[in-house]
Amino acid sequence: MIKVEEETIKTFFTSFIEATNTRIDSVIKEVQALKTSLEFTQAEFKTIMDANPVERLGAFETKIEALVDKVDDLENRSRRNNLLFEGIDEDNFRRETWKQAEEKLQDIISNNLEINDELPIERAHRVGKKRDDGKPWPIAAKFLNYKDREKVLQARKKLKGSKIVIREDISDKVKAKQKELIPKMLDARRNGKVAYIR
């Protein structure tokens, strides 16, 4: 009996020591990876700090620009399934519920765009600042499926002549870039070229 107990205790301690060693090895690897990462960051920072002030400022500006671009890209990716619907009347200023906004969109999709399938909308709500011109705020809609969003976007030409406009929901940075490119696009079209903004 004592021998059996000794073997059991020995097996338990062996397993415990092996598990502990595995954990210690894992912690050592993680610490080493963090150390390597920190050394790389410190070396990069030292290079920037050792540079003259003008070069240092340039390096920081480059990094900031890269971060701004990354944030803008992430913002546009998060809006990938979104569309903005403009020109849809409001029942009550800023008191319209998400459900009411969604019902209005489903009605337009069905009757105006002639899309008979019910397209699932994850969220729909009014966006923007208070307008002085009395026009209704646009409704931002997030579609559950990107393909449904594309179907609505392609059917928007059926709204020509109405006060309702459907636009892509994009970041301010992309809007500014589009505004800059529109005159060039129109100029190219006047010269008989096929031109569009992507």
Image (spheres, rainbow, N blue to C red):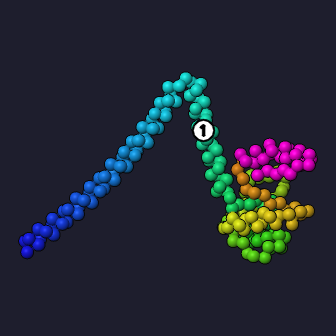
> Which residue is situated farthest in the top direction here?
52
Q: Quadrant of residue 141?
A: bottom right
**Which residue lies under the disc numbered 1?**
64
Q: Nearer the viewer, residue 10 or 129?
A: 10
- Callout 1: SS: helix
* Residue 82 is inside the magenta segment: no
Q: Quadrant of residue 13?
A: bottom left
Q: Is residue 191 visible?
A: yes
Q: Is residue 67 above or below residue 144?
A: above
Provide the major secondary structure of the magenta segment: helix
Q: Position of residue 137 (x, y in %)?
A: 78, 58
Query: Dot 1 surroundings within 10 Å: few (below 14), some, or many (20 or more)?
Result: few
Q: Nearer the viewer, residue 68 or 84?
A: 68
Start-end of magenta stretch: 173-198
Check the picture and name the quadrant holding the N terminus: bottom left
Q: Position of residue 68 (x, y in %)?
A: 63, 43
For image coordinates 74% across by 60% down, the residue present is: 83
Q: Amino acid at mark 1?
A: Ile
For image coordinates 84% across by 50% down, the residue present is: 195
Q: Position of residue 163 (x, y in %)?
A: 87, 61
Q: Is residue 138 above or below residue 71?
A: below
* Residue 193 is inside the magenta segment: yes
Q: Is residue 138 visible?
A: no
For image coordinates 31% across by 52% down, the residue present is: 25
Relative placement, left or right, of 36 versus 136 is left
Relative placement, left or right, of 125 versus 180 is left
For image coordinates 72% across by 72% down, the residue present is: 119
